[in-house]
Each structure stands twice: as structure tokens, then as C-alpha cells.
Amino acid sequence: MLSVLIIGTGGIARVHAEAYRNMEKSVRIRGIVDTDLARAEKFARTYELTDTPGFSLYSDYREALAKGSFDLVSICTPPPFHCSMSIDSLNAGAHVLIEKPMALSLEECDRILEAAQKTGRRVSVMAQNRYDTSKARIHRLISEGHCGRVLYAQAYSAWWRGTAYYNTWHGSWETEGGGCALNLAIHQIDLLLWLAGSVGEVTAFTANVNHSSAEVEDLALGIVRFNSGAAAGGLGEILGSTVHHGEGQQLLFQTERAGLAFPFQIKATRSRAGGFPEDDPETVAELTALCNSFPPLAVEWFEGQIRDFVSLIETGAASPFLSDGNSARAAIEVVMALYKSAATQRSVSLPLSLDDPFYTRAGLLEHALHYNRRVLSNLRGNAAEGVGSNAYP
Ligand SMILES: NC(=O)c1ccc[n+]([C@@H]2O[C@H](COP(=O)([O-])OP(=O)(O)OC[C@H]3O[C@@H](n4cnc5c(N)ncnc54)[C@H](O)[C@@H]3O)[C@@H](O)[C@H]2O)c1
């Protein structure tokens, strides 16, 4: 029976608690932490934790790690705490499940990975979107080569948020660490990398076009060139947004044989005389039948990932869906390259080196924050500070 500590008892912690509750044969929540004690107490009541033998409630996670003995820590706090809480938990002997984004810089990601390596404990970063039967089926179609190469991929993370959203820890570089690219598009970027392959080059624009209460971007647009996996040599597009009415998350993979999209759809085209297109229903039928022959996931979304992580801890067997620290770091690297490209107004090649200013949080704050403030200032009509007339050196 694994003993679980949840740090942070806000919105997303509820989903973790529900998953753990459904797995009570193998895990038990024995501790929760929140600096807001009233919130933690309410959380404990909601999930009937107070009667659990050995359960304690804390306001300081370091005290929890020192006093309790936890096998697994769910880190559900805002992003600036992810790095220190992960490292301290690993050093206390626990495995860690970190909410996205893994951390606020590549340097922080590397310190977490180093601590995991040193302690021999496991890290997983929440990427629940992988745990969806239709995505799992498309993953098999692509990774088993049924569709040929991926020529073009598109990951649209189109959300809408009002001003009040940015009156919390969201909206500032200090407390959120970035805007919609880091905190929302990260899900789609993870899927893009998982399904298509790794990215070698990024060209991007970011802007804050409609949230003057925030200093982070509310719009990010990136073009990427893939350099490995099914999409090697192909191109992709990334959109992060909190200005899209109606919202709508989209993924599209144009492969040699078919177009694969989420919401789930398969289209195929073949050539008529002269190279002009016509529908190819036979290929659609073949790929659809293949998809339907792949078994559905037994458990989807958050609980699917949490079950896989617990199983990895218990048996050492890793599921192909489970996001580990390395894949989460790869998604952060694409976001940092996107911020670098926007701030420098140049294409950026990956990997970002250890001496790149965008490798560290201090560098990111200095450059991206400075850039965003100038863009924001432009939006508010202060043309003298506009980015066009005052390009990044
Ligand atoms: N996987 C997803 O789809 C998804 C969805 C929403 C949020 N998230 C992520 O989950 C994390 C938390 O987001 P949320 O929406 O639950 O935030 P939230 O504001 O609702 O909850 C955060 C909680 O952490 C507590 N907290 C803050 N600092 C703390 C500290 N030092 N020690 C202990 N507790 C502390 C706060 O009091 C609060 O109760 C973020 O990283 C966010 O990006 C992931």
C-alpha cells in the first residue's frame, strides 16, 4: 500500500484525490498540505481523509516530508513551487507526480531529473491528454508505420479566459512563469512531440492582445521543423491562446496516407489523372478498421496516468503512455524556444545549450519579460516603447 502526500489542495488536487480514492486497494492518501489551512481542512472533509489511519494535514510541505513517510507525492501547487517541492520530495525518498508544467525553466527540469537519478526515484508529469482511446489509437497508427511519414502537424490550444482569470497566480511572469504557451498549450505540445517526433527548430510570435491585466502572453504562434520520429523533416504549427471564442483544442497530422485529426477524424485522398485529388474511402475504411481493432484504454485521463505511475512504482514496468521527466522537459524546451524566438525575432535551433539565457529562469525573466512588457506597452498605445521600433538586440 503506497502512502500518498498531496501538496496543494486547489482545483486540480481534487482530480488527483478522486483517482487515489478509486485506487484504495493500492494507495492511501496519508497527508495533505496547503498554506491555506481552511482550504485543506475542507478538502480533507470532502474526501473523508480525517478518519484514515495515520492521516495528517500540514501547512508546510517540508514539515510533512520530515514527519511523514510518503512513497508518492502529488505536487498540485502553482508552477514556481514545482522544482523545490519535487527535489525535496525525491530526497525524502518519495516518487513524484508533478502537475504540468514540470517547472519554469530547463535548468529547473534538469535539477529535478538529477535528483531522481541520484535517489533512484521516479518522476512523472501530468499529461492526461495522452490517456484518451482515440489518441492512443492514432499513436499506434503512426508509431507502427501504418500511415507513413507525418508531413505536417498542427496543435491548436485555443482557450478563452476573461480578465478575472489573471487576477490569481495566473498572469505574471513571477507567479505563473509564462502565459498560455507554458500553461495551456503545453498539453498540445506534449501530444505533438509524443505523436509526431522531436522539434529541431522554432520560429514564433507571442503577444498580449486582449488582457491588459496580465503581463504574460495571451497569444502564441509557432512554426516548428521536426528533426526525428515519424515527422522528421516535416513542419508543424503551434497555437496557444486565451482569446478564442468558443474554445476548441485541435490536433491534425497530415501523413503520407491520410489526415488524422482530433476531434477524431480520418480523411484520405488519392490522385486522379494529372495529380488532382479525389477521396480515398478504401484507405479511410482500412485505417478506421485498424483503429477500431486496437483495444480501448481501460481507464482514461488523469486516473489512467495515475494508475500507470503507481504500477511503474510497484512493478518497474513503464507504460508507453506515461509522461516521464524527460518527455515533460522536451515540451518545456519547445516553449522556451518559442519564447526565445519571439523575444529575439529569430528562428531558434534546439537543443538550447546550458549557457543559453533561456536555459535559466533568470534569463527567461530578463529577456521574455522585458520583451512582453514592451509588447504590452505597445498594445496600450505607448508607441515609443513598441517592439517594432525597439527590436531586441
Ligand atoms: N493537468 C491539467 O489539466 C491541469 C489543470 C489545471 C491546473 N493544472 C496545474 O495544477 C497546478 C495547480 O493549479 P490549480 O488550478 O489547482 O491551482 P489552485 O490555485 O486552484 O490551487 C493551488 C493550491 O496550492 C496551494 N499552495 C500555493 N502555494 C503553496 C505552498 N507553498 N505550499 C502548499 N500549498 C500551496 C494554494 O493555497 C492552493 O490551494 C498548476 O501547476 C496548474 O498548471 C493542471
Image (cartoon, grey):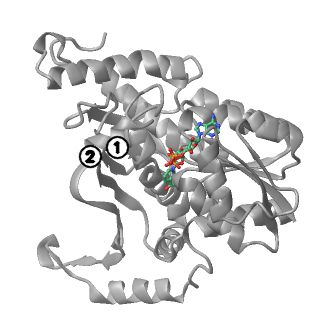
Q: Amino acid at mark 2?
A: Gly
Q: Amino acid at mark 1?
A: Tyr
Q: Is residue 166 above or below residue 292?
A: above
x, y percent for residue 133: 51, 76
Query: 332 or 286, which is in the foreground?
Result: 332
Specify few, some or many for label 1: CA neighbours under 10 Å numbering under 14, 14-19, or 20 or more. some
Query: 25 or 322, which is in the foreground?
Result: 25
Q: Is residue 117 visible?
A: no
Q: Is residue 253 above or below residue 205?
A: below
State yes or no: discs 1 and 2 in contact (Cβ < 8 Å). Answer: yes
Question: Which residue is the site of mark 2?
Answer: 162
| Cα separation between marks 1 and 2 | 6 Å
x, y percent for residue 183: 44, 43
| Element marked by disc 1 | helix
Task: Give the side of residue 356 with respect to residue 241, left or right.
Answer: right
Question: Which residue is the site of mark 1?
Answer: 165
| Element marked by disc 2 | loop
Q: Which image quadrant is residue 64 in?
A: top right
Q: Is residue 50 above or below residue 258?
A: above
Ligand 1 found in image quarter: top right
x, y percent for residue 288: 41, 85
